[in-house]
Amino acid sequence: MVKVPLDDKETMKIFLGPEPLGVTSEQIMCNTGTLGIPEFGTKFTIQMVEDTKPKTFGELIKISGLSHGTDVWLGNAQELIRNEIVPFSEVIGCRDDIMVYLMNNGLKPITAFKIMEFVRKGRPSKPKDHDQWVEYENILRENGIADWYIESCHKIKYMFPKAHAAAYVTSAFRIAWYKVHMPVY
């Protein structure tokens, strides 16, 4: 059994272009080398990869979270990146990102958890939950959370868990490693 390293530099390069595969973009009609890689081979995810230019395994996990959420990428994180409001590294990708970010910005763990749960279920945009969202918004503003972050949370309808994204990416990266290093298999 081959042990596939999850930090292989050549494998990561296929997310930036097809050259590690010995082909050109024109030959495969794709700007990345991710065709046939689960999680990263659809038109939607290829565009995400082109927009974000991932260079680390952690960034691949963020892409997986973004691609499985609802109103997390389109009309949200994608616009923040394209309009240069924040870099890819700062956008919300998975539900866990919210809790960790809020705790790192001074919120108590239980408050950060409650806000994360509220956001990941898409409750900020539901009329019946308006008053609760206003309360959470005030807490976020009192703790110096940026307007773009609060607005991003407000748009989210569903968020993917990071552990699930990590499992998907681990499997996909292993397949990508074989594509780069042992294509016959």
Image (tube, helix red, strand yellow):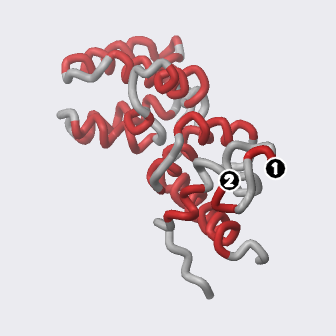
* Residue drawn at 45 percent across, 40 percent down: 95
In the depicted structure, whether residue 31 falls above or below residue 57: above
CA–CA distance in space, label 2 to label 1: 9 Å
Between 144 and 1, the one lying in front of the other is 1
Q: Is residue 39 visible?
A: no
* Residue drawn at 50 percent across, 14 percent down: 128
Q: Residue furthest bottom?
A: 1
The circle on residue 9 is none
Between 154 and 88, the one lying in front of the other is 88
* Quadrant occupied by the C terminus: bottom right
| Circle 2 residues within 10 Å: few <14, some 14–19, many ≥20 | many
Q: Position of residue 18 (x, y in %)?
A: 68, 53
| Circle 1 residues within 10 Å: few <14, some 14–19, many ≥20 | few
* Residue drawn at 22 percent across, 39 percent down: 104
Kindly state the secondary structure of the residue where label 1 is placed: helix
Residue at the disc numbered 2: 18
Q: Position of residue 22 (x, y in %)?
A: 71, 62
In the depicted structure, whether residue 144 falls above or below residue 94: above
Q: Position of residue 16 (x, y in %)?
A: 58, 48
Q: Tag 1: residue type?
A: Gln
Residue at the disc numbered 1: 27
Q: Position of residue 162 (x, y in %)?
A: 47, 50
In the depicted structure, whether residue 63 falls above or below residue 8: above
Is label 2 in contact with label 1 (beta carbons under 8 Å)? yes
First in sequence, mark 2 or 1: give its number. Answer: 2
Figure quadrant of residue 178: bottom right
Kindly state the secondary structure of the residue where label 2 is placed: loop
